[in-house]
Every structure is written in structure tokens, then in C-alpha cells.
């Protein structure tokens, strides 16, 4: 876990990703939630859940694919929950903005260290 970009104020993660112009290697597979619709235009190996069409239903295969994606993404959500325990992501950051990246990366380092004892 490492912080590569952050924004000022409330900004959606996908908007931050687009603003950062971060170039990911094409071999990386991005697993995202439904808030990242259109991510496949920026990165070919990205996966987002299939949304139900208006007045329609998802097929069993699409439901199965969505469930598999959510099973793989739950690990990411658990990491985000662990970082929110430190309150740097959960509440308004009231310290110097210059040091946000440093502090966030230190907290991510603590998490990474606990992960690999």
C-alpha cells in the first residue's frame, strides 16, 4: 500500500486517478467498484461490476462474474477499513497539507509491516 496522489477537498478517487495521469503497466489488473465506470477506457485490464440495465436483469453469468469480482475486492476494502482506523482517511485532515502524503505513507508502511511480520 502506498499513496501516489491526493487532492484538496472532497474529490472522488476516480477523478484523482484521472488527474494524476498515473501510467500503470499493462500487465496490472485493476479491480474497481461501480464508481469507476469507464475505467476500461484508460486501462485495458480493468474490471468493474456489470450494472443492471434499466428495466432489465443481469444474466446468471454476469451475476457470477460480479460476485467473483467482489470476492477479490473484499481484501482491498479491508485494507481501506484498516487505514480508516488511523482516522487520516475517515475524518477531515486538519494538519499541514504538505505533510499529508508523508503521514499517509508512514501509516501505509505500518500497515505493510504488520502484514509481513
Image: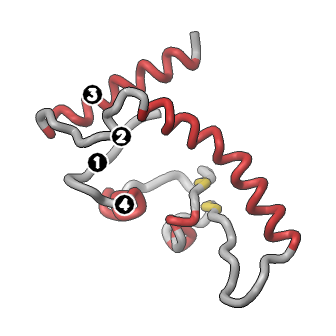
Say which quarter of the image contains residue 32. bottom right
Q: Name the residue under label 2.
A: 90
Q: Quadrant of residue 108?
A: top left
- Label 2, label 3: how many angstroms apart (C-alpha)? 14 Å
Which image quarter holds the C terminus?
A: top right
What residue does disc 4 label?
12
* Residue denoted by label 3: 103
Q: Residue furthest right?
A: 60
User: Which structural element holds mark 4?
Assistant: loop
On the image, the x and y values in percent for residue 89 come to: 35, 39
Residue at 66%, 88% in the rendered image: 54
Q: Which residue lies furthest to the bottom in this view?
A: 55
Crowding at mark 3 (Cα within 10 Å: few <14, some 14-19, many 20+): few
Question: Looking at the picture, does residue 115 appear above or below residue 43?
Answer: above
Alpha-carbon distance for marks 1 and 3? Answer: 12 Å
Q: Are marks 1 and 2 in contact (CB under 8 Å)?
A: no
**Which type of secondary structure does the marked residue at label 1 adopt?**
loop
- Front one among 29 and 88: 88
- Binning the other alpha carbons within 10 Å of mark 1 as few (below 14), some (14 to 19) or many (20 upward) gives some
Which of the numbered marks, if any, corresponds to residue 6?
1
Which circle, 2 or 3, is nearer the viewer?
Answer: 2
Give the x, y percent position of residue 18.
37, 64
Res 101 quadrant in image: top left
* CA separation in Å, label 1 and label 2: 14 Å
Q: In this rendering, which labeled residue sits more in front, label 1 or label 4?
A: 4
Amino acid at each position: 500500500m502506498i499513496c501516489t496522489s491526493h487532492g484538496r477537498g472532497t474529490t472522488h478517487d476516480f477523478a484523482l486517478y484521472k488527474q494524476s495521469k498515473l501510467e500503470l503497466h499493462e500487465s496490472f489488473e485493476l479491480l474497481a467498484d461501480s464508481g469507476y465506470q469507464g475505467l476500461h477506457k484508460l486501462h485495458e485490464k480493468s474490471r468493474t461490476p456489470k450494472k443492471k440495465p434499466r428495466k432489465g436483469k443481469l444474466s446468471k453469468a454476469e451475476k457470477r462474474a460480479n460476485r467473483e469480482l467482489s470476492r477479490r475486492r473484499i481484501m482491498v476494502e479491508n485494507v481501506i477499513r484498516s487505514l480508516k482506523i488511523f482516522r487520516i482517511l475517515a475524518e477531515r485532515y486538519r494538519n499541514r497539507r504538505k505533510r499529508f502524503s508523508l503521514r499517509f505513507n508512514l501509516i501505509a508502511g505500518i500497515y505493510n509491516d504488520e502484514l509481513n511480520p
